[in-house]
Image (tube, grey):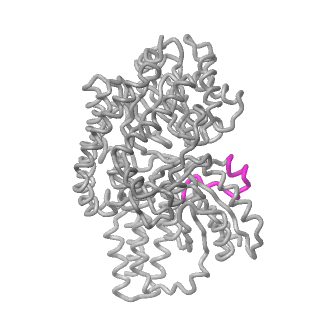
Amino acid sequence: MNFKQRILKTMQHEEPDRVPVMGLILDPATTNRVLGKESFNLAAMLQSGELDDATLKALQSDETWNQTYLSTVSDSLESAARLGFDANWVIYSYMQLQPDPQTSLGWVWHDPYGRVWEIGSDNHGNTTTNYARGLCTTPQKWEAWVESKREVFDRMIDSVRAFHIDVVEKFGDRIYPIGYAAPGVFENCWQPMGFPEFTRLMYQDPEFVHRIVAFHTELYLRFINAVMDSGVEVVLGGDDVGQKTGPLVRPAMIEKFFGNSYREISQCVHDRGRTLIWHSCGNIYQFLDMYVDWGIDGIITMEPTAGMELKKVREQIGHKLVLIGNLDITRLLVSGSKEEVEQAVKKAIADAGPGGGYVLSACHSHSEVDPERLKWMIDAAHRFGQYPLSLPAN
Amino acid sequence: MSQEILQQIREQLLELDLDATVAAARQIVDQGDKKLAKSAVESLTQGLEIVGERFQSGEWFLNELVYAGEISREVLDLLSPLLETGDESTQDAIVVGTVAHDLHDLGKNIFGSFARSAGFRVIDLGVDIPVEQFVDAAREYQPIAVGLSCMLTPAAQGIESVVLAIREQEFSVPVRVIAGGAAVTQELVTSVGADAFAPDAVTGLNQIRAWGEQR
């Protein structure tokens, strides 16, 4: 059984030859360590003032962005394939470099939805990009923003399609690249405004909120359709609705404003015969039944530090959802011992593996995740994840 | 009449009805009654304590916590001309900021807004704050606590750096360190020697309130 067959059988809640292992590798710090590459620090270059006008202009072009981004993701897929993962998530992001006197660097990324992303560097000297604030802090600003970005959205969707086709062509015979349509509709609604302002609007101007949700749903459908044009049978979608102790927003309000949006997205994916796996960080127990109702086929992440436990999730939802993830990235896959990694793998497989429908993976990614520990995780999955499982149920 | 207004402020806050809560506060402003304005702040505080209890019990969610804070802030802004706040430096202070290399400020802002609404003086240093800036602020304001927010695991080592630097200082009153955020766990807080873990804004504020009462 090859990696693709293993993943697809698991998506059907059937037992393949062994529990598949998926990478959530994105960070250059991790890929560089696997591939032996040098770090690249855009923040340091911008700070030093060594970039001439022609280079800065090139950095602001779509072409440079797309080439650089594809190169970064290719590295992550190459490193995931070398480590032995069956699949890796693949996210396309579109940003434009903009001067910004508010930051010490003088430059930031703008995404087309209206967010500012600050450019920094990680502990290993690689470029990092982090959401900093929104640019559309009122409904009027948001209306003006999206009106001015219509042509940018069109270009972004074209780039999404070309990117995912490229990735599947380059890596599809070695690893399963699961395309991820992100950010989600809820995130795209609130982050350009800020959470307090968006919360206020949910209470005081629900008609506007319905309008912004409809706008982002339509755009998201175009995005996920462009991902599916690459031919992959499984796609990732998502929306961060959880925080450390529970939902960010009352689930009934999520249903009121976003439920039909999510139903449309899952219907769109199913109409094309694909499987939809959904991502949310945080504690999401209260959304599990809603995911099933919205038509979502599986979930990815399940952060243990937010209280998510595979056994409890399975008890609550049975095999109505495929489960992916749950291995800790705060300590286990950063500095845990080999024995601890093996124990965590055994527990995850025992809790979620019986009957298929579980893909082992880290619960997320960041620059301190250690490739050696990822390799231990994969090796342990190969040792203890052979079907029929012989691990005692926890 | 006065009791009715105070009751209305508390109850409408708990109904998350911004217009009705502000309308009640406006009656006090129209009357120009300073004593009643002070009582209104107490009613608001009582209401927020119930909001916090509902959040902690899981009955209410973050959006409700945030919106209640927004309503309270509007009411306090409206009443402020009638309130004799005195010297701001005498209010119980809390210094907050995200640790170095972390720009995610949602949790910090929610905590800050809630703490301000509850009557604390919040010195918000912002995001990506170097250790020295936390130390300088702690020395200047002698706060009940320095609140560290951290969402990114790679940035979490910044918590220990701040704890160590704060411990090296000498204060005339105890200055505690409390940390919260997606990357923070009780295990981490214990290992770096911080005073408390804040799994959410309300728990954090309750802890700081308890420390304040011990001062």
Quadrant of the frame with the C terminus of chain A: top right
- Foreground: A249 or A162? A162
- Residue B28 position in % (x across, y down): 38, 83
The residue under the point 44% across, 57% down is A52
- Foreground: A110 or B80? A110
Whether residue A128 is visible: yes
- Residue B211 position in % (x across, y down): 68, 67
- Foreground: B91 or A265? A265
Q: In the rendered view, would you say A90 is above or below B100?
A: above
Question: Which range of residues does the magenta coloring cover?
Answer: B187-201
Question: Residue A93 appears in which quarter of the rendering?
Answer: top left
Question: Residue B69 appears in which quarter of the rendering?
Answer: bottom left
Whether residue A207 is visible: no
* Residue A9 within the segment the image draws in magenta: no
* Residue B190 within the segment the image draws in magenta: yes
The residue under the point 71% across, 73% down is B215
Taking the image as shown, residue A208 lies to the left or right of residue A56, namely left
The residue under the point 32% across, 37% down is A160
- Residue A259 position in % (x across, y down): 30, 41
